Image (cartoon, helix red, strand yellow):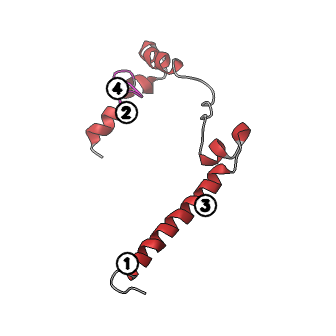
Amino acid sequence: MNPTVARRALANLVPPKIATPTSVSTGQGPSLAPLVQFYSKLPKGPAPAPAIRGFKERFMNGKNASGAPLLWFIFGVFGLGYTIDYNMHLKHHKNHPH
């Protein structure tokens, strides 16, 4: 990854004019006020849980619990296998009839 791309991506996290080494190292005074103001605007507490985490939570847990996706997967694998087997059988009989 190019360093300039990383700097641009991280530029929104900590503004470079606020978090300079001299303002942070002193520990108090008016130079630290913009940094405190910036961090006081950030959300506090734990992050909210994502609504849908994965396949199992979407189809197998909760009020929409169903075994239908599992059955569709089994039928799909069967259909794919049957199609491949049928095409191989046709290739076998292409030049050699029964």
Residue 91 is tagged as 1
Q: Residue at x 35, y 34 (%)?
A: 9
Residue 16 on the magenta span = yes
Q: Secondary structure at mark 3?
A: helix
Give the magenta part as a residue range: 11-18
From the viewer's perspective, is the residue at label 2 or at label 3 nearer? 3
Query: Which residue is the site of mark 3?
Result: 74
**Mark 4 / mark 3, whichever is N-terminal:** 4
Q: Nearer the viewer, mark 1 or mark 4?
A: 1
Q: Are marks 2 and 3 in contact (CB under 8 Å)?
A: no
Q: Nearer the viewer, mark 3 or mark 1?
A: 1
State whether residue 83 is above or below residue 52.
below
Question: What residue sits 64% from the left and 55% below the top?
Answer: 70
Q: Earlier in the sequence, mark 1 or mark 4?
A: 4
* Residue type (three-letter) at the residue carrying disc 4: Pro
- Marked residue nearer the N-terminal end (2 or 1): 2
Which residue is label 2 attached to?
10
Between 62 and 50, the residue placed more toward the observer is 62
Q: Which residue is mark 4?
A: 16
Q: Amino acid at mark 1?
A: Lys
Sequence-first tag of 3 and 1? 3
Of tags 2 and 4, the one toward the viewer is 2
